[in-house]
Every structure is written in structure tokens, then in C-alpha cells.
Amino acid sequence: MEEHHSNKRKKTYDNKQRSGPEYEAEQEDRDRSGRGDRREDHRKAPSLQQLQHAAHLAYQFPVPEKGRKWTVSIAVPGSILDGSLTVELKTYLVGQIARACVLFNVDEIIIYNESAKGLQKENLGKDDYLPKSDPNLFMGRVLQYLETPLYLRKLLFPMHRDLKFAGLLNPLDPPHHVHLDERSLFREGVVVRPRDGKYSIVNCGMRKEVLIDRPVPTGSRVTVRIHGADKDKKKMDKNAKTAAAIAAMEASLTEDKAALQKYFMGTVVSPKTPREETGYYWGYQVRLADAISKVFTESPFPNGYDLTIGTSDKGTPLSPTVTASVPNFSHALIVFGGANGIETAVEADEDLKCGADETKDMFDMWLNTCPGQGSRVVRTEEALLITMAALQGTLSSQGL
């Protein structure tokens, strides 16, 4: 019986034979360190709140040196999704496009129809926004969903939990996604209800709702200049219009002290204001084009695009000499083609009276941004990353 118990004891973790020949040396080191650092072993582990605070301090968003007036737009055909066999793969591809655009501060994404068939834009935003027959609408809707800050998705996309792709999408992070403190000068929000017929109340994802200076239809997504933080008050007071609007709201609520405590005060501004005043990237706008010609003719800028670049493996190879020839611009447009190039969309466009050989004449510059490629075809999502990385410095220096 005693021998049986002895054998059982030998099977424990501390048995020298089972632990190997280095057991004794390791045990001595453990004993020595345990005696010397006993006080260290009993230190209290950091709390979750302390860890979160440390992570917040470690994360610093890069601060731009000045505002940015110039913009960069890209155009891609929705047909690039045709090669993906499942909704999940299509969603992943759109996510790659969106992420690349955020990395390189793209302000507008145009999805153009590569075929002659027109788009049914009225379907964009309805429950049937996932028509398998129209990849253009699919891409547009997913891009809109990705660009929406997390705290607004439930308000703008109430059906998002039912979407097949919702769990596949990682959030993008321009500043209106990550600035969650109340000291931010600008915030994205959704109008939730009117007040007194003169104002509206906006949910900006903060502990208080924001009272804005004008009536705006409920459900509208707006950019708000927040008033309240001491460090930002001086900046805001430089804008006489903003200061006057805030003063008028506060004066009208003098008798309602509860309202003054309940809301932050703010004014509605254009979505381009944060970029122009502070230089922060404020996300991208999504536009649908029935054909490639509409990419140019339906530009949201009054004078259109003053720098247009087409990408093709038949273009001029990108080199320091070519990048040095890029002129100054205010609004740049970079167009990418599908599997068969931009020429396919040009031939299908009935409004254009030119053939495939004349495609390059539509652009100020016709570039091959990946000369000497090892693959027969450079995918559009790959061409986007390559092109934007190659032109980023040039665009930043030439933008007006």
C-alpha cells in the first residue's frame, strides 16, 4: 500500500524524473527569484480602467499642420465585383477599396457603370439595396455603411443587424469615428427631433444631445460645430456667424435653465468645413454615375476637375520625371478601369463619340503606375493602392 502511494506521489508535476535533468537548476532559480522579489509578486494588477486610460494616452491621432482646400476623387467600375462569387467576398473587396481610400485621404468615390445599361439610383437606400444583378448599387451601399461612424449606424441603418455582411466589415477611422471626447470641435450626428420649430436636436454620440441653430429634417446626417469646450471657444468666437447663432439660442433658452444644462450648443456646417479649416480627413462622399462620361459631367465642384488621370497598362510609365510634370490643381480625379481597362467603359458609353484608341485623350495624364508588372492583370483594388501610394506625395505638394 505504501509503495502504491509512493508511486502516486512520483507522478506529480514536481517529480524530478518527469521534469527532466534541468529541473534542479530551474527550481533553484525560481526559489531565488521568489525570495528576492516576493514584494513584486504581490503587487496589484492594473485595473481595466487603468489599461484603457493608458491605451488612450498611447494613441495620438496625427494633427495636420493646416487646412486643406484641394480634394482627390477616384472612380472605379462596380463591375469589379462580378468576379466574386459570394456576398461575403464582394463585401470584403469593397472593404479593401474603402480602407485604401481612407488611408490616402480620398474625398469622393465615384462608382461608374461600365456597361450601357443605366442604374436605378432610386433603389439606393431602400431595403432592396442588395440586388445581385447590379454590383454598382451593392458597392455604393456598402461604402456608405462603412463610412458611417459606429455611433450613428443604428440610427442610419436600422436593419444593419440583418445584413449578411455586417459582421465582416471593420470600421474605418477618420476623425469623426474616433474623436469620442466632448472637446472635439466638430462632430458627425443625426437629427433625432425638432425643437420649438426653430431648432433641431442632434445625436452626436456624446453624453448630451446637441441643439443646433436651425430646423433640419429628422433623420438627416449633419456635421456639427460643437460649442462648449473652453479650449475651442476661442476658435469658435473668431467666426462671427457661429457666435451670433449660439448667442441667439442661449438667449431664447434663458427661461428654460434645464434645457441649457441638458444640451450642448452647436451649429450646422458643411461636411467640407473640418477639412478646410483644420486639415482633418472627414471621410468620403459616394456618387453613382450611369456611365463613365457622367463621372466628369456630374462633378459636384462648380468648375469640375482640373486634373484628370487615367490609369492603364498602356499608359506612360510612372517615373520621377512624370510626377514632376503634375500641375497644380484644386480638384483631382483618378480613374481606374475594370478587368479589361477603362476602354471597355468608353466603348459602351453612347454619349462619347470616341473609340478605345482615343481613351487617353479624355485625360490630362494617362499613366501606367505599375510598370514591369509580373502579373498579366493588376486588380483594381491593387492598382488603387499602388497608384495612391505612388502619387500621394505629388498630390500633397501640388494641391492648391
Image: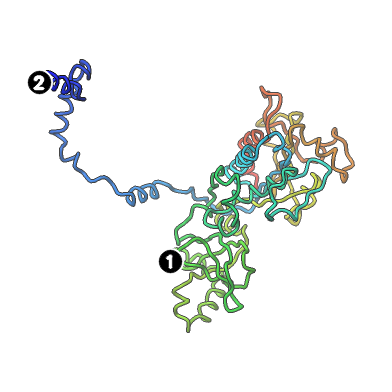
Q: Is residue 352 above or below residue 69?
A: above
Disc 1 element: helix
Residue 193: percent from left, percent from top: 58, 70
Pick the front one: 6 or 281: 6
Judging by the rendered image, the residue that carries numbered circle 1 is: 230
Name the residue furthest front.
1
- Numbered badge on residue 114: none
Q: Residues within 10 Å of mark 1 (few under 14, many from 20)?
A: few
Q: Residues within 10 Å of mark 2 (few under 14, many from 20)?
A: few
Judging by the rendered image, the residue that carries numbered circle 2 is: 2
Pick the front one: 112 or 2: 2
Q: Residue at x 68, y 29 (%)?
A: 378
Q: Residue at x 51, y 70 (%)?
A: 265
Pick the quarter of the image with the N terminus: top left
Q: Amino acid at mark 1?
A: Asp
Q: Is residue 395 left or right of residue 65?
A: right
Q: Quadrant of the rendered structure where residue 389 is?
A: top right
Disc 2 element: helix
